[in-house]
């Protein structure tokens, strides 16, 4: 199978996970780029940020039109994560591949376990900028360092910390994730990471189309089933990455 076909197929699968609420999100992008398209971990996390930015902006427009974005809460949360995202983004390219892979495997395992045991969080009724600093900074650092969107962390944090209703949490998280990813990508602008655009662009195009299929899939398959399937995939990815990271 040619690299171009692999890029299209991998992008479509990642896109489906991005489009299915509560599924794998962008966290499947990095392992797909590393193990199917031979990107280095540093290049894969950088390329993943490109995918996260494009997909977040695309989805944010749809949620904003539906009135499902809490702009003040999202901007507060995003602002707390911008500097950590930029710093972590610049640092990531200088971290040994083994360390980066192991850290990503740990986050993938965390995401999988979270999806298996996800419960609907409850807001506390208080919107506070001060309360957003810690969680927002942590999310920004994770996004910048590992190139993942972090929606599985952002949604419960927005609900419990900033009292964003669940009906608007996903849309608001896209604002946070997109802003963090864009700043993290800028932080890597001067690093010596090469991106193979002949593979990344087809991957991105397929991901955009796959995201629409993911949204349609939600109407046919229960959210619980989707979460369990993607949780199993993420846990398998975490084990595989952890096992192959150390010689």
Image: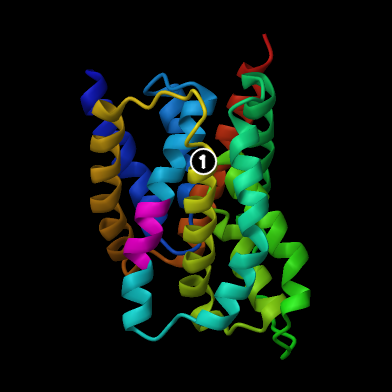
Looking at the image, which is closer to me, 214 or 169? 169
In the rendered view, would you say 226 is above or below 220? above
Residue drawn 73% across and 63% down? 135
Residue 159 x/y as whole percent: 65, 77
In the rendered view, would you say 135 is above or below 246? below
Q: Which segment did they paint magenta? A: 53-59
**Mark 1 — residue?**
233
Position of the N terminus by quadrant: top left
- Report whether residue 24 is seen: no
In the rendered view, would you say 242 is above or below 231? above
Position of the C terminus by quadrant: top right
Main secondary structure along the magenta-highlighted residues: helix
Looking at the image, which is closer to me, 91 or 118? 91
In the rendered view, would you say 7 is above or below 48? above
Residue 45 x/y as whole percent: 51, 35
Residue drawn 37% across and 23% down? 37
Q: How is the image coloured?
A: rainbow
Relative placement, left or right, of 135 versus 86 is right
Relative placement, left or right, of 8 versus 224 is left
Number of labels in the image equals: 1
Relative placement, left or right, of 27 versus 99 is left
Q: Quadrant of residue 137?
A: bottom right
Looking at the image, which is closer to me, 2 or 79? 79
Q: Quadrant of residue 81?
A: bottom right
Q: Dot 1 lies on which element?
A: helix
């Amino acid at each position: 199978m040619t690299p171009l076909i692999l890029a299209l197929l991998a992008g479509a699968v990642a896109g489906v996970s991005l489009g299915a609420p509560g599924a794998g999100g962008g966290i499947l992008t990095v392992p797909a780029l590393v193990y199917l398209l031979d990107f280095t971990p540093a290049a894969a996390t950088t390329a993943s940020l490109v995918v996260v930015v494009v997909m977040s902006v695309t989805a944010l427009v749809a949620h904003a039109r539906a009135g499902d974005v809490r702009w003040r809460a999202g901007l507060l949360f995003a602002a707390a994560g911008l500097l950590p995202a930029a710093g972590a983004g610049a640092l990531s390219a200088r971290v040994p591949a083994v360390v980066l892979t192991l850290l990503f495997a740990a986050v993938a395992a965390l995401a999988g376990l979270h999806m298996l045991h996800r419960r609907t969080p409850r807001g506390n009724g208080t919107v506070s900028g001060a309360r957003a600093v810690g969680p927002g900074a942590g999310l920004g650092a994770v996004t910048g360092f590992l190139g993942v969107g972090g929606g599985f962390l952002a949604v419960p944090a927005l609900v419990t910390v900033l009292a964003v209703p669940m009906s608007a949490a996903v849309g608001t998280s896209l604002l946070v994730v997109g802003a963090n990813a864009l700043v993290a990508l800028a932080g890597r602008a001067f690093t010596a990471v090469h991106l193979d655009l002949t593979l990344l662009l087809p991957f991105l195009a397929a991901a955009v189309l796959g995201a629409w299929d993911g949204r349609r899939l939600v109407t046919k398959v229960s959210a619980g089933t989707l979460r369990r399937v993607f949780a199993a995939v993420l846990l398998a990815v975490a084990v595989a990455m952890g096992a192959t990271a150390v010689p």
